[in-house]
Amino acid sequence: MSAPPRNLSSTTDLHGVRWLRSSYSTGANNCVETARPAAQPYAGLLAVRDSKAPAGPALLFSRTSWARFTAAAHRI
């Protein structure tokens, strides 16, 4: 089986997922939104998209990769 893509259309390929924003986000739409797709082949991955462009692409991360990224961001 081939690996899923690293990015995809957030409106077509991830239709029906629940996108979430941080409670720290303001109403200015200058943040990212995340979703946890349940359907294969994306189950177990984290989807991330720009809140200013919800119809744009979403990046896909493994849980480990996202945890490492956020840990590094906290250290900055």
Image (cartoon, rainbow, N blue to C red):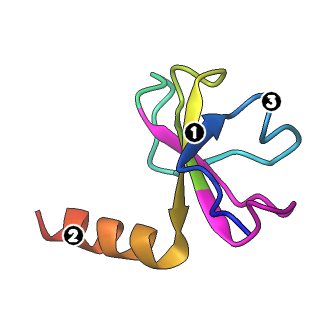
53 and 60: which one is in front? 60
41 lies left or right of 71: right
Question: Label 1 belongs to which residue?
Answer: 58
Instruction: Name the element at disc 3.
Output: loop
76 lies left or right of 73: left
Q: Amino acid at mark 2?
A: Ala
Question: Quick check: 74 above or below 34?
Answer: below
**Residue 26, x across and y down, in percent:** 46, 33
Q: Amino acid at mark 3?
A: Thr
User: Which quadrant is home to the N terminus?
Assistant: bottom right
Residue at left offset 60%, top offset 50%: 5
Look at the image and give the residue range highlighted in magenta: 31-46
Instruction: Name the element at disc 2.
Output: helix
**Residue 39, x across and y down, in percent:** 87, 60
Q: Amino acid at mark 1?
A: Ala
The dot on residue 71 is none
Question: Label 2 belongs to which residue?
Answer: 72
Q: Are marks 2 and 1 in contact (CB under 8 Å)?
A: no
Tell us which disc is closer to us: 2 or 1. Answer: 1
Structural distance between the alpha carbons of marks 2 and 1: 21 Å
**Label 2: how many residues lie within 10 Å, few (<14), some (14-19) or many (20+)?**
few
